[in-house]
Image: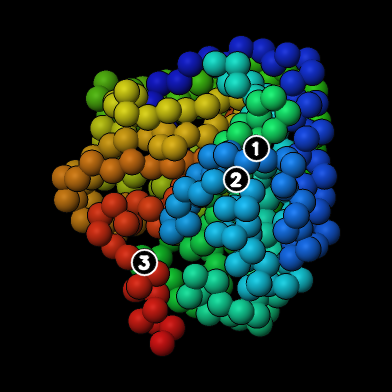
Amino acid sequence: MARARPTVTPPNRADAPRAARALLAPLRAALYHDLGGAAGSGTTVFAPQARIRLCHPFGDVTGWQGLWQTALGPLASAMPDGERRDQIVLAGQDHDGALWLGCAGLYLGTFIAPLLGIPPTRRVVHMRYHEFFRIAEGQVVEMQAVWDLPEMMMQAGVWPLSPSLGREWCVPSPAPGDGLGPHTGDGAQACAHVVAMLAAMIRHPQEGGPEVMELDRFWHPRMMWYGPAGIGTGRGIDGFRRHHQIPFLKAMPDRGQQPEKTTSHFFAEGAYVGVTGWPNMAQTLTGDGWLGIAPAGQEVTLRSLDFWRLEEGLIRENWVLVDLLDLYAQIGVDVLARMAELRD
């Protein structure tokens, strides 16, 4: 997703990514080996007043206990054999020097009890997550996370809104199989490439046609764009544009033009780049064609949490999760209430 004009991230301190990984490693292991048994695993990892910012409908909570009681605990109850399986782990410092660790992966298990009213399938299900942790003084002091709840709804057969233009599937790990790192290099070059790509992307349509984005300069010809459930995956620049970018820009051509209303935290390690922000996009719905949403002329914000991987100096893979349930809530659509009409 294209967002507000970012600031180039400085190189990481050599010890910063290592410290972030060391702090989160025991918790990540506990959530993988036994999701339901991990209730006490984050008590010392998170500061007592850590700000936990979760996707709709969970909202903001405080500390590890708030995270467990509001989100992780109910998920563990819904899938008692569940696990949290990382596909990407990335650590680094943003342009303000704040230390972040970002994880992308899947929660998976046998879905045997309802979650947020989503009916159980009694089969294996998977749900993508992008989770970002800000670390200070040896503890997590902030978390920003999007879970792909629409993906769960689709597997349960109760997604009540428009079908995806892209491919819906279980999104794969990075092609080289090195997503967990640690990644060689401070990531400065990779981050600068992504920042330049985003700066070029927001030139269209204000400064001209699609050519002003210079997509061939930044994206690999065999790129994969892994969007959230509700949008889906596109391959190559043509697939990315047809299945996401063209309808997105038709609906909100002013995207990226209100940076004062957003915040983005970019950081990188090796060939991987991550960004989080709450929100990190602000634009106006003035056209139709995206997600079946009417052009209401309403300003909306997006929480778009992304990871990129570069190959041969170009972006080869881009994992994107957007808090779509929050977007719909902003325009007065209660997706979970609509889902209940299909369930009951």
- Kindly give the residue lying farthest to the front in the view shown: 48
Whole-number angstrom distance, CA of label 3 to CA of label 1: 33 Å
Q: Quadrant of the N terminus?
A: top left
The kind of secondary structure element at disc 2 is helix
Identify the residue at the far bottom of this view.
Answer: 344
Q: Which residue is mark 2?
A: 63
The residue at which mark 1 appears reads as 47
Tell me if 196 is positioned left or right of 315 in this view: left
Residue 336 spot, x, y in % from top left: 39, 69
Q: Quadrant of the C terminus?
A: bottom left
Which residue is tagged 3? 335
The image's colouring method is: rainbow
Depth check: give the residue in front, 232 or 101: 101
Task: Tell me which numbered mark, 1 or 2, is placed earlier along the sequence.
Answer: 1
Do residues under tags 1 and 2 come within 8 Å of each other at their CB atoms? Answer: yes
Q: Is residue 171 above or below residue 256?
A: below
Which mark is nearer the camera, 2 or 3? 2
Crowding near the residue tagged with mark 1, few <14, some 14–19, many ≥20 C-alpha atoms within 10 Å = many
- Report if residue 165 is visible in the image: no
- Towards the viewer: 206 or 92: 92
Under mark 2, the amino acid is Gly
Q: Is residue 199 above or below residue 236?
A: above
- Residue 182 visible, this angle: yes
Residue displayed at 43% across by 83% down: 343
